[in-house]
Amino acid sequence: MPKTLRLILGDQLNQSHSWFEEKSDDHIYLMAEMRQETDYVNHHVQKVLAFFDSMRNFASEIETQGHQMRYFKLDDPKNPQDLEKLIQQLVNDEGIEKFEYQLPDEYRLDEQLRSICKNLKISTDSVDSEHFLTKRAFLEEFFKGKKTYLMESFYREMRKKYDILMDGKEPVEGKWNFDHENRSALKDSKLLKKPKAHPKDLSGLLEMLEKSGVKTIGKVDAENFPWPTSRKECLEVLDHFCKNLLIHFGDYQDALTTWDAFLFHSRLSFAMNSKMLSPLEVVQKVESYWEGHRKEISISQVEGFIRQIIGWREYMRGVYWAKMPDYAEMNFFGHDRKLPDWFWTGKTKMKCLSEAIGQSLDLAYAHHIQRLMVTGNFALLAGIHPDEIDKWYLGIYIDAIEWVEITNTRGMSQFADGGIVGTKPYVSSANYIKKQGNYCDHCAYNHKEKVGDKACPFNSLYWHFYERNREKLEKNPRIGMAYRTLDKLKNKQEILEQAESYLSNINEL
């Protein structure tokens, strides 16, 4: 058997991978903390800490199981901070005869590893990461010849293929989708439960980042770091979700409130995106728990959660591999405005945005409606360049890896792909934000007003967006009503001028 070097990336922390089924002195595993990964975008400090601590825990676990591990910390003098140099260094030092890697989930790393393999003078091979429900090319083949990739069709295929929430060939309780039942605003704070935290002291790791000169954004209490960074902790968070949060997850998954950051969301996205948990085990655990508690937990709660994982998450990954690298350049509306300065501070008079951004800076977290219908909605209405939005979302969230971030940002949030992911732009006036919670109750602006000093910027920017993009959107059958309403507005010109004024003074909003 050739002496083999096996690379494990920081988001490939899958202890169940078939690589680890056998122990051999001829297999050496390589993991490294690298400036290449800390510096390609300005990351949230909690994101960097979470990945590095999870990587160290994973490496320790693999070593405990009897596997050979070569782990390079960021400040190791033998760490060249260059992936190709590091691999070549190990090949030379260890007398390596073969190099293997798990297929990465980011296009840039896929290209880099292909290039590295071409330059190595030993045999090379790649294997699947054994995490996702589908192979990279599945979605493109599934929608062959289609301009729009309808997620619902893909979602139903996944349900059938893996026998999830199925009654024979039909969906459990006769419906595939209970989305219309999952849009309630939270009116009773007594329903809320504390999230499952795993406080640990990462102050030494933070000190290393600071001494190394790694630039980060956001805040952290490094002595009480709360995120799960081992498989054991991730499983505890999953168990906590099933027992305490699933009962109300669907009802309030779209709610916006100043009362709580996490609501009934699972906080499992980092655990899955780093591969400490697999999507199938999460879905099967949730389904199994629901089966035993049908009297207390309605189908709409569990279906809404499962759709996010085997529907949206798996689907977005498929879109990524079907459309990259061109997807990263798409800008359907030709937007070119810079991100407002307050996206990096949260200091804006708009309560919904100050809340969503402030929370993101404090916790490296925001749930999907805060991302889609608050920060994303504003960015689209204001005409922010998709590149600006990509960098912000990719950097600020603990779960953000390009394969899932860019498809949600350019596709679902910004409609920069022109309709591959969504059939229409996700935009709204203040009315939607008001309906979903209490943000508007605490705002300096009036959610009812379209013009004037106190008019909510979302209202005039909403109509300005449709007016300036009339040529691209008016023929969309799902948008006709918006244009009929716009053309009937008695003070249309005044509203458009209000929007222009706000855009000219965007940093003062």
Image (cartoon, helix red, strand yellow):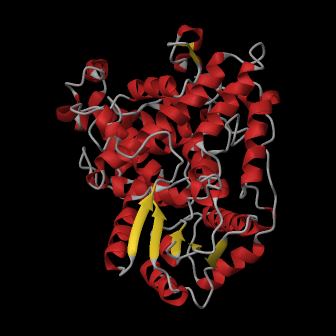
Q: Residue furthest left?
A: 471
**Left or right for 502, reference 351:** left
Q: Nearer the viewer, residue 188 or 390?
A: 390
Q: Is residue 336 above or below residue 81?
A: above
Can residue 103 be seen here? The reply is no
**Left or right for 280, reference 188:** left
User: Which quadrant of the view contains residue 139?
Assistant: top left
Q: Residue at x 40, y 50 (%)?
A: 406
Q: Residue at x 81, y 68 (%)?
A: 201
Q: Residue furthest top?
A: 174
Residue 410, given in percent of the width and then of the height, sits at 36, 46
User: Which quadrant of the view contains residue 376?
Assistant: top left
**Left or right for 104, reference 241:** left
Q: Residue furthest front?
A: 1
Residue 391, given in percent of the width and then of the height, sits at 43, 60
Q: Is residue 362 above or below residue 467?
A: below
Q: Residue at x 24, y 44 (%)?
A: 332
Q: Nearer the viewer, residue 501 or 98?
A: 98
The number of numbered discs placed on residues in the rendered structure image is 0
User: Which quadrant of the view contains residue 316?
Assistant: top left
Residue 431, given in percent of the width and then of the height, sits at 50, 26
Q: Nearer the viewer, residue 421 or 389?
A: 421
Residue 387, given in percent of the width and then of the height, sits at 35, 57
Q: Residue at x 72, y 22 (%)?
A: 290
Q: Is residue 294 above or below residue 195?
A: above
Can residue 487 be seen here? The reply is yes
